Image (spheres, coloured by chain):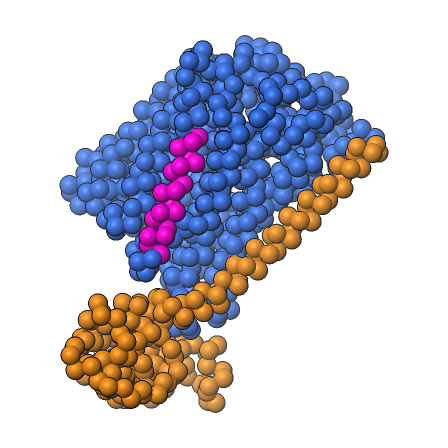
Amino acid sequence: MAPKLPPQHSLQQSSTAVAGGQSHHEHHAQPKGIMRWLLTTNHKEIGSLYLIFSLVMFFIGGIFALVVRAELFQPGLQLVEPEFFNQMTTMHGLIMVFAAVMPAFTGLANWMIPLQIGAPDMALPRLNNFSFWLLPVAFILLLSTLLMPGGGPNFGWTFYAPLSTTYAPPSTTFFILALHIAGISSILGAINIIATILNMRAPGMRMMDMPLFVWTWLITAFLLIAVMPVLAGVITMMLMDINFGTSFFDAAGGGDPVLFQHLFWFFGHPEVYIMILPAFGIVSAIIPTFARKRLFGYASMVYATAAIALLSFLVWAHHMFVVGLPLTAELFFMYSTMLIAVPTGVKVFNWVTTLFRGSISFEPPMLFALAFVVLFTIGGFSGLMLAIAPADFQYHDTYFVVAHFHYVLVPGAIFAIMAGVYYWLPKWTGHYPHERLAQCHFWCSVVGVNLTFFPMHFAGLAGMPRRIPDYALQFADFNMLSSIGAFFFGVSQLIFVLVVVLCVKGGKKAPAKAWEGAEDLEWSVPSPAPLHTFETPPVFHRTHPSE
Amino acid sequence: MTEYEMVRKAGVQRTVIRSVAALIGMFAFAFALVPLYDVFCRITGLNGKVDTTAQAIVHEEVDQSRYVTVQFITRGSAGLPWQMSVATRQMRVHPGQAAEVEFTFTNNSHQESWGRAVPSVSPSNATAHVRKVSCFCFQEQLLQGDERLTVPLVFQLSRDLPEEINTITLVYTLYPVHNMAMGASVNNNNTLGDEI
């Protein structure tokens, strides 16, 4: 996925100056080998680093998931100890959320936002380098806890106190440190993205002219700035409870474990939108391109995204319906959660209406985007079922919840990332991805995802609890299906790696405007995009009068 | 540097300063939520948090027309070799009537240790109507090795207890008291509850 470097740039260092000033800077000899990647301040190279890191972590987190699924293939304890099983469910969640999905979106933002708004680079290129290189540090530290005495984190990715304080393994302090570093990385990335979008747009491009991927990322970055400090606060309190004798979450000293859940989900619910809003942006770019129509309801898409982001601060306690909330609170959080279905429905409606009477072709990015719309909507509907407080008492902590959030995260966030990768690969590498192989990857993924996660709905409704290595016999068939699906899905992701590697190495040459219906600014630069683009700001032509 | 670039640079600086200010604000807000949550719970009685200071008996007419069942649950905790038992598992009282029930603490180890029983009331909307006149839960307890201690709980349900409540559960959970929390209230801090 590394960008092809045109020869004239190969001896020049990418600029370290604040964007806009680099044309006046003298160029030093570019460092070679590893130092080039350690020191790079180029948004395209850093974007590629983010994406490669995310792909590696996707496979590591995937292997953890396969350990879980292998143990659950049959009832009884066969392969791993329950303690290790708990570490696997926890690490799978943590790695996928913080090391796979979030860096993938940041990588796409790094690559595409400057290109889509006509900026020469991100606003703060050196900060950009720093925020990427924090990530390997954080996750090597996190993964190393698996080798420590007492094992790694085993309390679930939500790390509820007192499981994560009083009863936690000794490695928890390392887990906290790793999460702090990853959090700093996200925050710095978010500041950079906001600074870029607000200040670096091509002259003449107004906010309401920005592509939706830029808009959704702007809103996501605001969410990150609002809630990552809360996460940092929570884990700092945990750190003090564990090591310095405070009692934030310890009832013995006047604290309250339920407070942990309130604080965690005040971060956690906006966090799940952080993982889906950029996906909305990607899909909103792909569907108009391959339907060869303008996106229906651009302005309503922007407002719907903002509405979802604002509502995300008012719904956190729907994760805690069974902690003993008073009736008023149960009702408030139930209705506010259901309210989110309205702006989300606006978005799904707009995508479907964009497709209506479109001249649709089914290239790989479009296949993934269409699967996103259908399967994400299924995940949204099971979310509505979970939002009903009295029904949630039945569903809480069962596999129904697991089915729900995997439907919104795997065929939701991950499919959108893959759609984005297939969509922009021609721009990154100058070659189209191999069509047949990409189709094969798509169909294997769709079958695998549904085979893995659809049976979980039934197992959950029948009462199978989450995070338990053994289960009652009546759940055996559903679990066997899920496990087969999981291994099928996992192996078929190797096709994705193959397609990407082949595409970097060669393939059908792509022109600057790689897709017939693509309109945004990134398609005006050559494919592959040279290391430096838009060094003089482009003139932005409004392709359509915005409302 | 052109004027356009200068404007851009100033804009980036302004954005960064505002973002960092928002960050610091949200970090502080997370910590501010801890006391806010506590105050919120105490005012509304949510979460079963009761006053941990003694209240005076209010002499009001006893409501003879209704009975309320009060249940007592005691729970031990890891790390404290104590047993806690209650003279009666449940009793029936009229709102407004003062009642007394005896709790017994037994230290099963041969060493003295400090512990504390933390109360909780369920349902939470009854919390504000349970008036504790005297309770062992107001402070830490010291038990010598093998000591057995019987202490009373004197309480009163207020007359304005909501109509729909006819059972109230009082839960006491024992916790060891660590060195840290003890400094203020103990002079000889040689043997204290062990860390979990």
- Which residue occupies 32% across, 45% down? A387
Q: Please identify the dominant SS of the magenta region.
A: helix
A288 relative to A398, above or below: above
What residue is shown at x 51% (from left), y 39% (from top)?
Answer: A306
Q: Does A81 lie within the magenta span?
A: no
Q: Quadrant of residue A506?
A: top right
State the residue at coordinates (35%, 56%).
Answer: A329
Judged left or right of residue A305, residue A17 is right
- Residue A116 location in percent, x, y? 62, 26
Tell me the quarter of the picture where residue B71 sits.
Answer: bottom left
| Quadrant of the rendering where the N terminus of chain B is positioned | top right
Number of numbered markers:
0
Is A474 situated above or below A535?
below
The spot of residue A393 in percent (x, y) is 25, 51
- Queried whether the magenta region covers residue A333, the answer comes back as yes
- The answer to whether residue B180 is seen in the rendering is yes
Residue A410 visible within the image: no
The colour with which the image depicts chain B is: orange
- Say which colour chain A has: blue
| Residue at figure coordinates x 66%, y 39% from the top left | A195
The percent position of residue B3, horizontal first and vertical second, equals 83, 34
Is A488 on the left or on the right of A438, as rendered? left
Q: Position of residue A18 (x, y in %)?
A: 75, 37
| The residue stretch that appears in magenta | A329-347
**Seen in the image, is B130 located left or right of residue A462?**
right
Q: Which image quarter is the C terminus of chain B in?
A: bottom left
Residue A139 position (above or below residue A380):
below
Pick whichever, A111 or A38, lies toward us: A111
